[in-house]
Amino acid sequence: MSSSKMKLGYWKIRGLAEPIRMLLHYAGVDFEEVVYEQGDGPGFDKSCWFDVKFTLGLDFPNLPYLMDGDVKLTQTVSILHYLSAKTGLYPKSSNPADISRYDMIDHVIIDFFFVGIRLCYSPPDAFAANKAAVIERGKDFMKQFSSALGDNKYFAGDDITGTDFLMFEAIDMFVKLDSAFIEQDNLKKYMERIRDLPQLQKYFTSPDSTHNWALNNKHASFR
Amino acid sequence: MADKMKLGYWKIRGLAEPIRALLAFVEADYEEVVYECGDAPDFDKSCWLDVKFNLGLEFPNLPYLFDGDVKITQTVAIMHYLSNKYGLNPKEFAVHAQCDMLDHVAIDLTNMGTRLFYQPKEAFEAGRDGLVKNAKGMISQFAAFLGSKTYFAGDYITGTDFLVFETIDKYTVLEPTIIEEENLKNWMKRIRELPTMHKYFNDPSTTRNWPLNNKMAAFK
């Protein structure tokens, strides 16, 4: 059996896969993007995915998916946790209190992320009507994230972990919705710190980087 | 001296019930901190909102768990913490990754229902059949993953079993015939018959007799 390259499957957007891509680029993992591109409006055809969805050997077919040898995973947080452990980008503490705290933060970030994602995919009139309130709700989360980060470089302390890639992407989405979104100095510096990482320069500056893709799929009100 | 472990949540099954099931299985000594919202039409939530930001929670939410220095929210994080504390973690790395995936699929399945249960009654009724159909599909995926194994990680129980059990059990309240696969029915029975869980499943005062959802839900 060939030990084939790790594969990450997702739409041709940043979406939920981008934190995973960032982690893989940061860790220097050679992986293959399996890219599904939705059709244009009005049909927004998703058959490129639906035609193969149930034939890939995934237990719970969904996007994003990760194939790594015998391991076939879906669910964004699970993929991030798996890759964090594999690449050493996992919290160094073995204290269960710390581990549970970072686990909690990952899931709060997902809640925060989906507040924004649901807005982006709501119909245009709902998007316009709800945008201000959703931004305010996002800012409430940001107060808590700022407090949790404190003076630390990253959420787990001095070392970057998978949590930080998830946080970066979720915040970046909200910044695209509202350029003045980040109010706290420590979070502004945090975002710059990640943008300046040597291991991510190619990722951030390369013209064909996935970082340049749309955030959301073609049928979204905000891409 | 450390305070007793506390689990805070609404007076419903909701997201806390998998946590309660795990704690019952390990016969943990803990305190339920119960918040009960008011009746219609206001469904007053001040019992929670008045204290929400005063409990020392970094991300105030329900359910929450206090255990000594640990103060956490987020259902999956709480389940993982307790699984680790009570030796209910998957043992192998790849199995651990799969159980993590199962945990998150269970949450997706739960949220799919929650989104409809809290709609106005007409919207709930209109969406009910579609929900049952979609849930059945996901439940079948759990059955296929379980296969001939005793529990989801293999021959030993993990926190994942309690999260998946409660997720699926809620749907049997919505539609009693929703589980079609024998292996899954047998696994549900296996968990119900765990010796340490007899009181949890059978005592009249069990939290399992509480409504699934809060008072403002179209389906409780």
Image: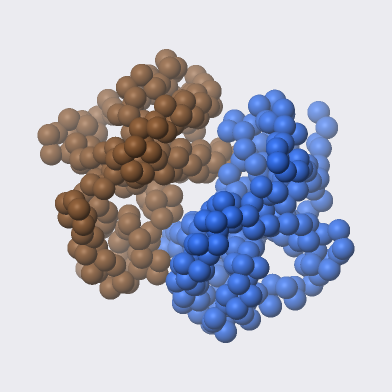
Chain colours: A blue, B brown
Across and down, in percent, residue A118 comes to: 54, 53
Residue that extends furthest to the right in the rendered view of this protein = A207
Quadrant in the picture for residue B73: bottom left
Residue that extends furthest to the top in the rendered view of this protein = B182
Across and down, in percent, residue A36 comes to: 75, 41
Q: Is residue A134 left or right of residue A193?
A: left
Q: Is residue B189 above or below residue A23?
A: above
Residue that extends furthest to the left in the rendered view of this protein = B204
- Residue at point 33% right, 57% down? B62
Across and down, in percent, residue A15 comes to: 66, 53
Residue nearest the viewer, comparing A31 with B179: B179
For the N terminus of chain A, the image quarter is top right
- Residue at point 40% right, 32% down? B126
Q: Is residue A7 left or right of residue A19?
A: right
Residue nearest the viewer, comparing B5 with B121: B121
Q: Is residue A166 above or below residue B14?
A: below
Residue nearest the viewer, comparing A210 with A100: A210
Q: Is residue A190 above or below residue A213?
A: below
- Residue at point 49% right, 29% down? B134
Residue that extends furthest to the front in the rendered view of this protein = A125
- Residue at point 51% right, 26% down? B137
For the C terminus of chain A, the image quarter is bottom right
Regarding residue A132, the answer to whether it shows in the image is yes
Quadrant in the picture for residue B96: top right
